[in-house]
Image (cartoon, coloured by chain):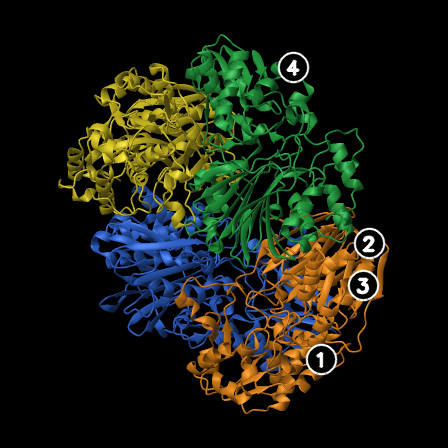
Chain colours: A green, B orange, C blue, D yellow
Amino acid sequence: MFIRPDRHNSYERWKPKDDVMVEECGVFGIFMDDRRYDPAEAAYLGLYALQHRGQESAGIAVADGRDVKFHKGMGLCSEVFKDNLGKILGGNISIGHVRYSTTGDSKADNAQPLVMSYRGGKLALAHNGNLINSSILREKLEDEGAIFQTTLDTEVMASLIARQSRHGILKAITAMMKVVRGSYALVIMTQEELIAVRDPLGIRPLALGKLDNSYVVASESCAFDAIDAEFVRDVRPGEILVINKDGLKSYQAQSSMKTALCVFEYVYFARPDSDIDGISVYRSRENMGIKLAQAFPIEADLVSDVPDSATPAASGYAAESGVPYAKALAKNRYVGRTFIQPSQALRERGVKLKLNAMKRNVHGKRLVLIDDSIVRGTTSRKIVEMLRLAGAREVHMMISSPPVICPCFFGIDTPSHDQLIGSKNSVEEIRRIIGADTLNYLSIEDLLKTVEGAGCNFCAGCFNGNYPVDMKEALKETEALDLATIE
Amino acid sequence: MFIRPDRHNSYERWKPKDDVMVEECGVFGIFMDDRRYDPAEAAYLGLYALQHRGQESAGIAVADGRDVKFHKGMGLCSEVFKDNLGKILGGNISIGHVRYSTTGDSKADNAQPLVMSYRGGKLALAHNGNLINSSILREKLEDEGAIFQTTLDTEVMASLIARQSRHGILKAITAMMKVVRGSYALVIMTQEELIAVRDPLGIRPLALGKLDNSYVVASESCAFDAIDAEFVRDVRPGEILVINKDGLKSYQAQSSMKTALCVFEYVYFARPDSDIDGISVYRSRENMGIKLAQAFPIEADLVSDVPDSATPAASGYAAESGVPYAKALAKNRYVGRTFIQPSQALRERGVKLKLNAMKRNVHGKRLVLIDDSIVRGTTSRKIVEMLRLAGAREVHMMISSPPVICPCFFGIDTPSHDQLIGSKNSVEEIRRIIGADTLNYLSIEDLLKTVEGAGCNFCAGCFNGNYPVDMKEALKETEALDLATIE
Amino acid sequence: MFIRPDRHNSYERWKPKDDVMVEECGVFGIFMDDRRYDPAEAAYLGLYALQHRGQESAGIAVADGRDVKFHKGMGLCSEVFKDNLGKILGGNISIGHVRYSTTGDSKADNAQPLVMSYRGGKLALAHNGNLINSSILREKLEDEGAIFQTTLDTEVMASLIARQSRHGILKAITAMMKVVRGSYALVIMTQEELIAVRDPLGIRPLALGKLDNSYVVASESCAFDAIDAEFVRDVRPGEILVINKDGLKSYQAQSSMKTALCVFEYVYFARPDSDIDGISVYRSRENMGIKLAQAFPIEADLVSDVPDSATPAASGYAAESGVPYAKALAKNRYVGRTFIQPSQALRERGVKLKLNAMKRNVHGKRLVLIDDSIVRGTTSRKIVEMLRLAGAREVHMMISSPPVICPCFFGIDTPSHDQLIGSKNSVEEIRRIIGADTLNYLSIEDLLKTVEGAGCNFCAGCFNGNYPVDMKEALKETEALDLATIE
Amino acid sequence: MFIRPDRHNSYERWKPKDDVMVEECGVFGIFMDDRRYDPAEAAYLGLYALQHRGQESAGIAVADGRDVKFHKGMGLCSEVFKDNLGKILGGNISIGHVRYSTTGDSKADNAQPLVMSYRGGKLALAHNGNLINSSILREKLEDEGAIFQTTLDTEVMASLIARQSRHGILKAITAMMKVVRGSYALVIMTQEELIAVRDPLGIRPLALGKLDNSYVVASESCAFDAIDAEFVRDVRPGEILVINKDGLKSYQAQSSMKTALCVFEYVYFARPDSDIDGISVYRSRENMGIKLAQAFPIEADLVSDVPDSATPAASGYAAESGVPYAKALAKNRYVGRTFIQPSQALRERGVKLKLNAMKRNVHGKRLVLIDDSIVRGTTSRKIVEMLRLAGAREVHMMISSPPVICPCFFGIDTPSHDQLIGSKNSVEEIRRIIGADTLNYLSIEDLLKTVEGAGCNFCAGCFNGNYPVDMKEALKETEALDLATIE
């Protein structure tokens, strides 16, 4: 599901529906060759490490060669499985999913993995990404007689796979890949097999690991560390990996001239201890700080960060500039993830509940403050105000990425155009709105240099509006598509 | 519901598996023509009155001409909607469902109404009954590419409807009715219409009511009283009722030479204040007691009942026989419906937690005790023992229905053959097992006399093994069926 | 805590405080001599049988000769102990308590047993009843330096006991009994002993039972049946029973010229299968019906009851009058005890959610309807209306007790004077308000005949305002009391 | 309550009781002079900022001049008040408490504030600290007839205050302070007053703030920032502050030659953005790192920290030594505070669930790793192992405090002697156990230099066994005490 990028174009069917959410997620899958882990426990550990990719719901499905069991629910994986992991122990394959949503309308019905029966038996799917043509595909499938019980793209992919399943699961997945457009890091489980699929552009990350003779796939490599598995390689864009008792087989279902890994994974989303497509997330962030220091040298007394994601960048800035690093903001570690304050007066305090200015450190100081991005600008404005009240003499804001000017249609939750401060304002206007003395953003060029050497190209659509898929074209094609001709 | 265990055997495939549940349920639907009730509140009141038909899960879906909202969950309707009714207020149509299960394995995923999108928009279904050929139909639909996310027959019916929906919902429902075999009292809601469907044999009850200009359908007439609606008539076997802003239209989709309303509804399941197909449930039970008194006159000091369902029968027995009525057993009103005792020692006390013999009433007395049925016999044995310990001189057990000798395949949860005491033992053997001085069952003939005058014939399959559907034939036909030919 | 009976006297300190509730409760205690039951399981079974005496909170405390463990919480005992009974297994003594409240302000802090440490070690108390001088005693104790953490009379009694505990527990209890006035069926547990105390007037019931060599005490005899114990005798008014490893000892601490067992226990509160002070509750209710039939013969077609407590009286009426008995009202068995409807519109339906008129039984009939009492009159009015709408030709209301004209100060929750319909209206006025054709109440004389032969006198204060304690005198005495002189 | 420090002394009554816990807590109180905040909301914000001082339970009590309302429960304050803050809105004074416990036996009954009625009306207390003579005092109070319903020292203090309350609350508090020994930062509320008390040694912190004309007290100054209040000064050791509608009055109830603020507050417990007794916690930690760098210069490639409390020290070490700072360990931000893993296998993974080595940063590197303390040593051993597996060439552990060799008896939860690695092993032995290349601890002298300039002396009892109270003497005195002589 996606949000129409432009109110004035002709794609009326892009119109966002009320019950549709754009989400970021984490996926995990393991095929155990031995008894080192129970598959559900391994999935739990993996999801636990991937929890930053989604805190709204969690789920695990397990296969034992004959049947599939699963449990899923709302909340952190530790909450969801507190009393329920025992129900899904046993078997030799598992897949898992964590899901993120910023809205209160989130529903248990949309938790994943999606488990179903189909011609071939049982099928479970866990998906990270976003299809841009799923609405049209849903309609075409409905025209054929299909029913849909969720608003998930995953169900559209499942329906497309089931539709072709008389040819076997591999051909069915290949057929599905021919018609869907967008991003998908997809983990599929049948009773006997674990299958990993990454979209032809490689927009969302997906990595392959190994633990003795057991194979594991996950959105980020930190999930491998969580079970002491070794990173093997990233799943290739357009690749289908099939893992079963005969081992691992790779099929290159689709290939693309140019890949388009989401660069925002490095800026904000991924965990610093993960490597994605060959690049250390921490190192890339540190480099963002170094580039900022090189591009925007400022006479200052201290450099600090908005905790926690900007910390490596601040560290890099300090090292490169020689300006000493110190904490300007203390973070309350007990701010709950879906924390709703019990009264309106409290909700209005907003970021002040989470961050507190370190008066002793900032009083009378000229301060460089690094943040990873500015989305709506309200948080930045309050932070600058807080620092000034604490006595900061100057506040120089540095952003370790370019201004976000466009929404994402490929799996990251962003507000619409009119709520993106970077989409409507010049840098100078933003500086005035947030009240900083100076404001500087990392250039796209510098940002891309921090991920240089990766085994792929990048999507920086949110920064420049250049999406890796020609959306108009893709929708037109999909509309013209006769599903009956797909093999 | 049951799953075909083996594609290649013949009658054995009917055997219910452990993980399969045969359920009894209650359904409700209303199309509000005015503002007298909010549709969700009306459904709530209706389900509240139908709660005896299912205590495991409850759900309500509401339509407003454009969209469908719903909420469902595990537990009594008062629990499920305690904090959630507000979410589904508004609109002008609602349907609701309560569901029963005796097992602990019940899943939220199987709660109804089942809500989905299909070619025509939104579709919600609530079903009471059981299809005997759903396994085969599922396979055929899966062979066509369908996926199934629940184990409900309702999903099979929905899939069949969606498959034909290009012809409009009415034709699609008619087509579905051509292929499914078994019992269904089905309430369907689209964005704009309320549709009620009863299977051609009329196995499960379904009634039509009216409140000013608003139409209402429900499993039992007591749900009409709950909203001050008037009973209009029973939905006819094989009838489709379509209710929308233009009023009510009736279509006779299927007809059968002989109808087969479940007689056990009168014996035990329905509420005494309901009328079903023209017969008062209370009155029929009272008559069962009268017939017992006529058939089995016994010299006794008092007649009593196993509370609560046998009370009208005991009352009838007392009136006819002249033996005074008094309570022999006190019932603990706080025994929870899904009450699991917190320790093994407590669980072993069984029925003693629920019933206590009234020593003062039974001591030294010759007692006629009326119960509605004996299923496994264990409860009856404990009750007789309890009464003897309390000093009863003689215990004459009378059952207001014949011995249950066969499982039900049409929507009532019964144990399998080998667990039915009546299936393996003569009446004399049962008497010895439960320890009564005498034991007498109402004859089928007498039972059917108590429902004489109803506008239908009856299924007494659990008492005589004569099921209203030739199951072998139905399965053979279904297997031979080519779905593609169905219009 | 208590409610001032008369606005015009001078006892300003009687004024009820907002957070004070007058409650009815059930108590249980057992000293296990063998391993037949775990003491916590025995208490659980006992409380389960006494659940009708209080559904708001439940608690059990267990002693093992050295220490006391306990668990208590809000809700039915099956809810409170679902996951918690295991925590208090072991030991050889237990006491338990269930508590009732009609208000929503009930607090967990007021759950019992109250467990504390004192000079002698650990002390646990469970109390049914109400002290009329506890406010004054609290103040006197506070003047001495005591603190109070609940609003329970039980804590006042505990404080008084602890104050004298240097003389041993028996003398301390005797000293407490000298100063408190009101009703108390009190079960006390130390590390090694079980102690039962009944107030000198015997206002609330308390019985002694035996199971092999284990002694058990409980509010009603039905709790003995629940553990297969035998009823031995009622605890005598003013008696202290001390049960320990040396067996049972009885001390007559106080005696009164005239005892005053609450007659309302028979009318409504107790379970029909209990015997209290020698009288069967069921039999007394049946006799109430017989007396009504003798006093008020009416030409009618059927006699019925408001379920469930009036059923024995209706049965007695039917037997005596020859008018046939049949159900006029069906009760929804799934109305939760603390059931709050999820919307205002639903709450306004009131008793219609719980009861439904049996149209088929009452249509065109002249009906005698028996209820146990009329408190505010609103329920009766709705019931009569419901029956008339269902077609009843005449509704003759019979109440199996006299009009309630005064509040209770001894442990039963009653509304204040101005909310008691019987306190402000003549019988004829009440008849008009509730809309019945005739209305008749049982006379006090007839009521007392139904409990004739009991080993005690009765309090009928709610019916005639004659309380067994001279409240003004008692309060004056208590105010004049110098606690320091109490030994 | 406390743990006997020495198995061989004679104070057998020190023996820890099973149900007794040594805890660290946070307290807050506010007297609102205007309507800027609702008192309950202000307390909520304060507790939210103090959440790091205790995550087991939270509570708030509110006074309005006539009565006291309160709510408390298990969990974070955001959890406890999610649905309950509304119940305690209104009034003009509030106090709050957060409580910490490492054991699973924690009970709701021990949550604070403790609210009670006493001679003077209502009294609410919130306490941070630990009395060493409370067991003896409890016994003496019990001998006088007192009862205790919790195991809290707070209840002992309340009982002592109530005992003397005929002289007014101020004299009663003064009398209490004469007999209790140990640490207490105590916030007391009556219907009309807010009172703050700090023990004569000033062991636990307590500060005074102001917001316009409203006074506020809290364990740490970060709670003032949370409501935009100004820090005024620390409450003085032995001081009683009484705040009411007439403003603030100070009484010096007790004074001591030497104060003894807990130095561990700076090392680990307090929030970095708090100032305590004139010293910035962040700055002191940074100085600990600087002192470490000066004392133990090491040739290394990078300096890092065990997140999060050691981060300022690592920052100071890096600045002073010139060794670059980088993250060696990534922390999982979703590790719940009372997080219990759902299976044994998962629990055994321990710290690996929480921390992950940053391979890219540490591979081949010589690493200085700063932690704030080593308690049992098991975590440090696993961290060193994890870093070596990630390829660290050398791991040089630096601890920003001296070895913990003695348990704390003044309010911080520490294991007993035999579980403290520093109590039984030399530094070299510890180094070998944890597997580091070198291990260095900050000296007490250097540690005390980092808090130089504070307005007080320090307790470093956990590092050197020199407790600020002669415990044997204190217990002997208390035993000899005749409570009756205390005025």
Asked if one can make out residue D187 in the rendered structure from this viewpoint, the answer is yes
The Cα–Cα distance between marks 1 and 3, rounded to whole angstroms, is 41 Å
Labels 2 & 3 near each other (Cβ < 8 A): no
The disc labelled 1 sits on which kind of residue?
Val
- x and y percent of residue A112 in the render? 58, 46
The Cα–Cα distance between marks 2 and 3, rounded to whole angstroms, is 15 Å
Label 3: element kind: helix
Q: Is residue A28 above or below residue A328?
A: below
- Residue that carries the numbered disc 1 in the rendered image: B451
Pick whichever of labels 1 and 2 is earlier in the sequence: 2
The disc labelled 2 sits on which kind of residue?
Arg
The Cα–Cα distance between marks 3 and 4, rounded to whole angstroms, is 67 Å
The chain containing the residue under callout 2 comes to: B
The disc labelled 4 sits on which kind of residue?
Glu
Answer with left or right where residue A38 lies relative to residue C229. right
The chain containing the residue under callout 4 comes to: A
Label 4: element kind: helix
The disc labelled 3 sits on which kind of residue?
Thr
Q: Residue at x 36, y 43 (%)?
A: D110
Quarter-wise, where is residue D239 in the image?
A: top left
Q: Which circle marks residue A429 in the picture? A: 4
Disc 4 and disc 2 on one polypeptide chain: no
Answer with left or right where residue B63 lies relative to residue A343. right
- x and y percent of residue C406 in the render? 52, 59
- Residue that carries the numbered disc 3 in the rendered image: B485
- Residue that carries the numbered disc 2 in the rendered image: B166
Using a 10 Å C-alpha cutoff, classify the residue at mark 2 as few (fewer than 14 neighbours), some (14 to 19) or many (20 or more).
some
Q: Which circle marks residue D348 in the picture? A: none
